[in-house]
């Protein structure tokens, strides 16, 4: 028979292992531990961040590069906003399964592959301008057909969209493949910027989560670039009545986008009754807060709602909602990679 003390120790050990396995306290790749929420200052921005840079992947000797240039653009990286400088490779770890796939060797032969690394806490349009400038330096002189392809995760999709609006770049775009990109912004970002009145809508627990979340995702120009555009008026009253930020720049982009017809949007979908299947429980906390605003948020990607991730209301080329994938696994899972490689390697 176990003693009461042994039973308690055993239970605590089980719960600790469950939490670690679930990803509530993720490790490595710049992830955040639960204790960091209480240690971090909400205003530790890096005044002199590492500059944005376009890094070329090693090219195979037998590369033809007949499909032109391929750029991988990462999403929001939380360490930027709190002043930490990680290994630059941490920014693109979500692309590692894709780059490690045997099919990617064929991609390297067909495309000149580059990784765009940028400080995500800075203004989205400034990052987009840096991408546009450096992209001009690596693409060859204008050709008779589109030869620029971009794969972007989350915030990276907005950076890419802004960059590719330029007169000399828009005609060069062949494909823009977005993975859980908030094409209409994310209400979560808007709520993080809301004032104390938001507790009337989300309750004291939701208000506590909002204030604690600001320690991991402080209010930065990059965060403002991800805010909800209110173009579809899904929860317009909540955006304006509780001091949340409304993204007028993104709304303008969505009305005037020159490359919308070249966008393919992939978006994960976790059903409400199966949300524990998601591999990162930490990211599920916003699900409870967002569900108080609108039921559509209860069963979907907790960081970006489905309508935004699929760019509904925009005249984009194609949409792929994929069941049982969350905000991160949409970039790493074999189901999404299959769609991406089919687009990259099709004749």
Image (tube, grey):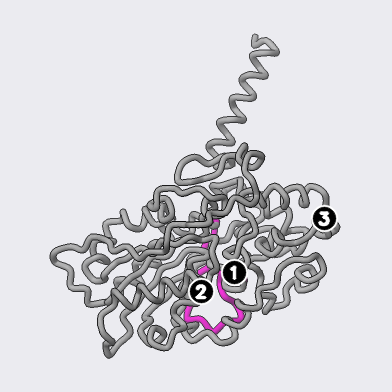
In the rendered view, tell whether residue 211 sits above or below residue 226.
above
Q: Is residue 288 visible?
A: yes
Left or right: 76 as drawn, with respect to 298: left
Image location (x, y in percent) of residue 29: 45, 46
Q: Which mark is residue 199?
A: 3
Disc 3 from disc 2: Cα separation: 35 Å
Mark toward the start of the polypeptide (1 vs 2): 1
Report helix, strand or loop for mark 3.
helix
Q: Nearer the viewer, mark 3 or mark 2?
A: 3
Task: Residue at 52%, 73% (x, y): give it.
Answer: 125
Q: Quarter of the image containing the C terminus? A: bottom left
In the rendered view, tell whether residue 8 sits above or below residue 212.
above
Left or right: 326 as drawn, with respect to 2: left
Task: Residue at 36%, 80% (x, y): give it.
Answer: 174
Q: Which mark is residue 319?
A: 2
For label 1, the residue is: 225
- 330 in the magenta segment: no
Q: Nearer the viewer, mark 1 or mark 2?
A: 1
């Amino acid at each position: 028979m176990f003693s009461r003390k042994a039973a308690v120790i055993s239970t605590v050990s089980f719960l600790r292992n469950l939490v670690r396995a679930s990803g509530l306290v993720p490790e490595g790749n710049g992830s955040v531990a639960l204790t960091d929420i209480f240690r971090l200052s909400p205003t530790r921005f890096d005044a002199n961040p590492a500059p944005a840079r376009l890094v070329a992947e090693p090219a195979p000797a037998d590369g033809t590069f007949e499909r032109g240039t391929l750029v991988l653009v990462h999403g929001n990286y939380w360490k930027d906003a709190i002043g930490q400088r990680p290994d630059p490779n941490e920014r693109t770890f979500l692309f590692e399964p894709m780059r490690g796939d045997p099919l990617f060797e064929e991609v390297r032969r067909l495309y000149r592959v580059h990784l765009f690394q940028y400080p995500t806490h800075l203004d989205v349009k400034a990052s987009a301008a840096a991408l546009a400038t450096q992209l001009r330096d690596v693409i060859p002189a204008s050709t008779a057909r589109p030869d620029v392809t971009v794969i972007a995760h989350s915030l990276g999709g907005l950076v890419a969209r802004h960059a590719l609006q330029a007169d000399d770049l828009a005609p060069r775009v062949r494909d823009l493949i977005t993975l859980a990109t908030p094409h209409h912004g994310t209400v979560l970002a808007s709520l993080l910027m809301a004032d104390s009145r938001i507790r009337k809508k989300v309750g004291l627990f939701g208000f506590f989560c909002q204030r604690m979340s600001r320690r991991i995702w402080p209010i930065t120009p990059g965060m403002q670039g991800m805010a909800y555009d209110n173009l579809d008026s899904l929860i317009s009253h909540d955006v304006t009545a509780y001091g949340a930020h409304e993204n007028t720049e993104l709304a303008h982009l969505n009305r005037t986008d020159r490359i919308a017809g070249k966008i393919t949007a992939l978006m994960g979908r976790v059903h409400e009754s199966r949300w524990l299947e998601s591999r990162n429980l930490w990211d599920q906390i916003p699900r409870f807060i967002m569900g108080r605003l609108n039921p559509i948020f209860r069963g979907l990607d907790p960081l970006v709602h489905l309508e935004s991730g699929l760019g509904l209301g925009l005249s984009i080329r194609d949409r792929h909602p994929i069941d049982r994938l969350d905000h991160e696994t949409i970039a790493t899972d074999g189901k999404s990679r299959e769609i991406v490689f089919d687009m990259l390697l099709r004749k």
